[in-house]
Amino acid sequence: MASNATSGLTYAEYTRRVRGNFFRFMLRPAGFTQDRFLPRSRLGFRKQTVEWIGSFGALWTGLLYFPFLLALAVANGFVVVRGWREQLESLCLKMFTLCLFVQPFVHPSHSRYWPVFAPLMAVSAAFLLKMATQDRRATGSGSATLTAIQLLYVLLVLATSAALFVPMLV
């Protein structure tokens, strides 16, 4: 199956698929309801009603989803330099994100999968709130190694993003 799935796969085609996977996985949280569930359901709604319910659901889902997605993105780009506990918390968030976001690289991804990382988005928001309200003097010195690992992670994410999405813009 693996050789069949990758037969004739070029770098350009692979990056096109991964971009599509990321778009559906991250940026269309109500896509499953709008594109699959409502139109194919046997509820007997008229097309107009299906579109209205889908738009209403997308609006309310987006109002909750996108601020927390932003928190996840900020937490992943945030490098903690003071307090080894905070550095470990930051690294845990980054590693959990890495584990969950490998899916678009290896499997077709759809909007129905975003609830998998929803708890991580909430934890990221709580982490950022903690970091914003924490007394800086109360935290001890951090580890240079943990800082370097965080920086390496951020650089690798940026490089991967650039490899995937910059060719699309050019």
Image (cartoon, rainbow, N blue to C red):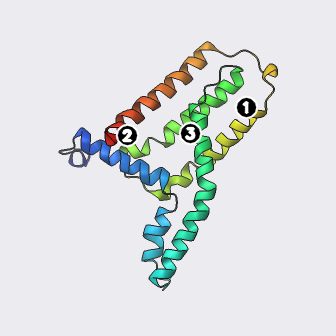
Q: Residues within 10 Å of mark 3 (few under 14, many from 20)?
A: some
Horizontal and vertical percent position of residue 69: 58, 47
**Residue position marked by numbered label 1 in the rendering:** 131
Type of the residue with mark 3: Ala
Horizontal and vertical percent position of residue 70: 59, 44
Type of the residue with mark 2: Phe
Q: Residues within 10 Å of mark 2 (few under 14, many from 20)?
A: some
Q: Is residue 34 left or right of residue 169?
A: right
Residue found 38% across the figure and 42% down from its top? 105
**Residue position marked by numbered label 3 in the rendering:** 73
- For the residues labelled 3 and 1, the Cα–Cα distance comes to 15 Å
Q: Are marks 1 and 2 in contact (CB under 8 Å)?
A: no
What is the quadrant of the C terminus in the image?
top left
First in sequence, mark 1 or 2: give its number.
Answer: 1
Residue found 71% across the figure and 25% down from its top? 85
| Residue 59 vs residue 85, the one in the foreground | 59
| Residue 118 vs residue 23, the one in the foreground | 23
Q: Nearer the viewer, mark 1 or mark 2?
A: 2
Horizontal and vertical percent position of residue 88: 65, 26
